[in-house]
Image (cartoon, helix red, strand yellow):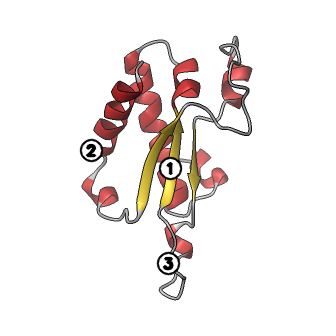
């Protein structure tokens, strides 16, 4: 999938989020990169089994959760959700699966933005 098509798909997913979530999101950028720079070699083969797929990082939240922000904090750049296009494509076999995985990943990372831990997100 081209980067432009993937970014459009991400924008569509963000537009379909419930208004009650969108209205509470402030100073958050959603970015797309190919792969995490520190974790995955640039030409790694497609994962062959579910164990390998589970280890791929599909997205990450970078910033301070909204539950930990204070009016006394110094201004800084926006919080970020980074989606890793090539890793998402590696665990999906068609565009419908990519759309579903993008939505799941965005919702998961928004959970971190709203202050939820990994353990809390597993229960959702």
Q: Is residue 76 above or below residue 2?
A: below
Sequence-first disc among 2 and 1? 2
User: Circle 3: is it few (<14), some (14-19), or many (20+) Cα within 10 Å?
Assistant: few
Read off the residue under disc 1.
81
Q: Residue furthest bottom?
A: 72
Which quadrant, please, contains the N terminus? top left
| Residue positioned 31% across, 40% down in the render | 11
Rendered location of residue 107, percent (x, y):
45, 46
Q: Is residue 64 left or right of residue 7?
A: right
| Residue positioned 47% across, 37% down in the render | 104
| Residue positioned 73% across, 26% down in the render | 41
Give the spatial CA distance, label 3 vs label 1: 18 Å
Read off the residue under disc 3.
75
User: Relative to the observer, which residue lies in front, 19 or 74?
Assistant: 74
Nearer the observer, disc 3 or disc 1? 3
Secondary structure under the numbered disc 3 in the rendered image = loop
Sequence-first disc among 3 and 1? 3
User: Circle 1: is it few (<14), some (14-19), or many (20+) Cα within 10 Å?
Assistant: many
Read off the residue under disc 2.
15
Give the spatial CA distance, label 2 vs label 1: 15 Å
User: Circle 2: is it few (<14), some (14-19), or many (20+) Cα within 10 Å?
Assistant: few
Give the spatial CA distance, label 3 vs label 2: 27 Å
User: Relative to the observer, which residue lies in front, 122 or 104?
Assistant: 104
Question: Which of the 4 image quadrants contains residue 116?
Answer: bottom right
Q: Is residue 110 above or below residue 79?
A: above
**Residue 75 in sight from this viewpoint:** yes
Rendered location of residue 28, percent (x, y):
43, 59
Rendered location of residue 75, percent (x, y):
49, 78
Secondary structure under the numbered disc 2 in the rendered image = helix
Nearer the observer, disc 2 or disc 1? 1
Q: Is residue 107 above or below residue 53?
A: below
């Amino acid at each position: 999938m081209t980067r432009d098509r993937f970014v459009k798909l991400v924008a569509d997913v963000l537009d379909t989020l419930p208004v009650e979530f969108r209205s509470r999101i402030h100073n958050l950028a959603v970015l797309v990169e190919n792969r995490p720079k520190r974790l995955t070699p640039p030409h790694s083969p497609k994962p062959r089994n579910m164990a390998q797929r589970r280890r791929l990082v599909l997205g990450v939240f970078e910033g301070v959760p909204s539950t930990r922000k204070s009016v006394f904090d110094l201004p800084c750049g926006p919080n970020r959700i980074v989606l890793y296009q090539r890793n998402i494509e590696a665990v999906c076999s068609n565009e419908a699966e990519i759309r579903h995985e993008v939505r799941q990943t965005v919702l998961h990372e928004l959970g971190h933005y709203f202050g939820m831990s990994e353990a809390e997100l597993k229960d959702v």
